[in-house]
Amino acid sequence: MKKDGLNCAGLKSWTGKRKGRRFFDLLSSFLLFFAIVVVAVFFPVNYSRAGQIFDLGEIVITATKFPQLLKDTPGSVTVITAEEIKSSRAKNVAELLDKVAGVDVKSYGLNGISSISLRGSSANQVLVMIDGRGVNLASSGDVDLSEFPLNSVEKIEVIRGPFSALYGGGALGGVINIITKNPPKTPVIRACLSCGNFNASSYSLLYGKGNDKAGYLFTGEKGYSGGDRQNSWKDFFNLTGKVVYSPFVLSGGYYQDKRGIPGSIDWPTPASTQENRKSWLDLTCKWKRGGSYFSFKGYLNQDEIIYENPDWFQKDTTESKTYGVNFQDIFFFNSRQKFIWGVSLRRDEVDVRTIDGTSRIGGKKGASLGALYLESQVKTFPDFVVVLGARYDSHSIYGYQLSPRVSFLYRLGELTSLRGSWGSAFRPPTMDDLYWKEDWGGGMGLFGNPNLIPERSSEYEVGIEHIFSSRILGRITFFSSCVDNLISWTEVSPYRWEPQNVDRAKINGLEGEVKVKPFKKLSFILNYTYLKAKDDKEFKGNFLPYRPQNKLFLALDYEVQPNLQLPLEGKVVGERYADRENTEKLPPYSLVGAKLSFKLAGKYNVFIKVDNLFNEKYADIKGYPMPGRTVKGGVEVTL
């Protein structure tokens, strides 16, 4: 079966030899880090500066659909700031998100497809948005995060937990909101050139200017990588634009890439290619009248994926189109109570054609959605805030769904915050799940099931955040969820597979994070995720595949001198099963990366980045080895 360019058949096991010495070298670094934390506890305390040093002063939108400080937001939220994005020198959104607690990004090799998991969810259970506009494919329900460059991104908000109460289907595991840059108030021209091993190169340009009422911003990027395996090359181009004329914001863009699809190492496809084309248009208007703040958004997403394998005489073209409108009203009753209501209308259209023009889903399929959501945030006491919300979705295929959610924030004094929430969410069947048709003859093949019902989940979480000193911030969150009616492709008769609502999962876990800035020029971030994601029905007691039980990430940023920075990163990923039967494991691995960045003459920023410094052999997906040591260097010029 080929879908979206993935070779899903004949995968064999692949494991790299783990170098224990490197693991313990990294482990010793973590022990050193904890020693620094203990010492830092005794530093003089200045609590008023904590919001400036850490992310507590960041304004977030996604968790409640209106702007508020992160320290005042109920729920489990992480903000990747503009400074962190620039410092990371990541090539795309996928590479950046893999460093966040509770997030697991799986890649099919150096230039392969990258999918995301939040708290053990599947990729199509995570809603990915750009400026509040959903970008998940209507055909498969997931997103390839490697298709989103970072040159136009201002910040990213990661919201963990069920959020169907605000965002409907697909937000079962959480929400990723990629927020783009606004036109700068002073004219800016920024160009960046970089190159690296595997014959990689990238060129980007940003140009914009504006004022308080009007402005524009345009970005473009062109890149190429030869890949680390046969037929693993990638060539891409990206263009975005944003025009502001208050109260209107018009944005749009185009992305195109073509890449080789090498297949797994034991089932190679040396001639396969995939071409991806994305275009979008987004019009937003915000205005105030009386005590209400109104917003309107109209949007259009168009996606085309062309997978071709001449060795198998195969060429599949997947076309997806989504257009819709959202309207929202935020009403402030008083300083202690806010009320939000909104409506959403959306239309999805999908077609998948083979090389001879036959449709894989029985012709162009369409579906319509209408939704109404309500949310109230009440400050019942000076230190206690509760949020109640619910959403009603009515879909032309799978009917109606009701998704409630309640969350709270309780301040235990000036330094400690307690957060908790419970919510119910759903993930609807995709067009592929409902209508896919791949007939091999004699009743064999892959066939969709139009009688599927949505997956449902119920999850609660409790977390605490504490400021140990003005330079130490700690967070820890426990979560537990049960996901029922999971859609699983099942062999219903010999060599005939159909999706069925036959599975159930139970997921428990813990997320911890510590941020330390012991000195003005030195900062640490450490996060750890423990995940216990198990099948609770079809393979009862087995771990869900590709969900590592332990994941640890450490970042160190050292400013050697005012114009010279030396960030270091380390990641440890525990072993995980590669199949539902739990018969094959991928070994644990540890990675270390380093960056060097320095400024010249005020406007030139030169950087060098090394990933997988010790050339570790590892894989996120069985049969798809990740590259060894990669080196990239470049220069950025700002005028």
Image (cartoon, rainbow, N blue to C red):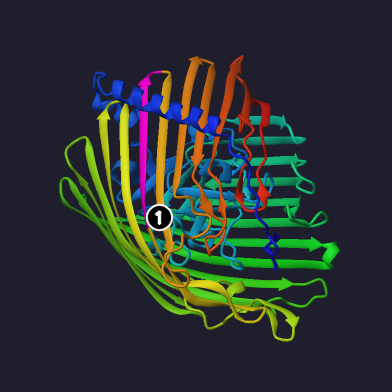
Residue ID for mark 1: 532
Q: Principal SS element in the magenta part?
A: strand
User: Residue at image x 44%, y 50%?
Assistant: 549
Front position in the image: 321 or 325:
321
Q: Residues within 10 Å of mark 1 (few under 14, many from 20)?
A: some
Is residue 213 shown above or below 495? Answer: above
Residue placed furthest toward the left: 381
Is residue 301 shown above or below 220? Answer: below
Instruction: Name the spot of residue 49 as percent of width and height, x first.
Output: 29, 26
Q: Which residues are magenta?
A: 508-520
Q: Is residue 352 left or right of residue 575?
A: right
Instruction: Name the spot of residue 509 as percent of width and height, x first.
Output: 37, 52
**Is 601 a magenta residue?**
no
User: Residue at image x 57%, y 27%?
Assistant: 594
**Is 516 a magenta residue?**
yes
Instruction: Name the spot of residue 76 as percent of width and height, x first.
Output: 35, 49
Toward which corner of the image does residue 442 lie, by quadrant? bottom right
Front position in the image: 488 or 87:
488
Q: Is residue 268 left or right of residue 576?
A: right
- Say whether residue 63 is visible: yes
Instruction: Name the spot of residue 277 as percent of width and height, x first.
Output: 71, 56
Toward which corner of the image does residue 281 lie, by quadrant? bottom right
Front position in the image: 166 or 21:
21
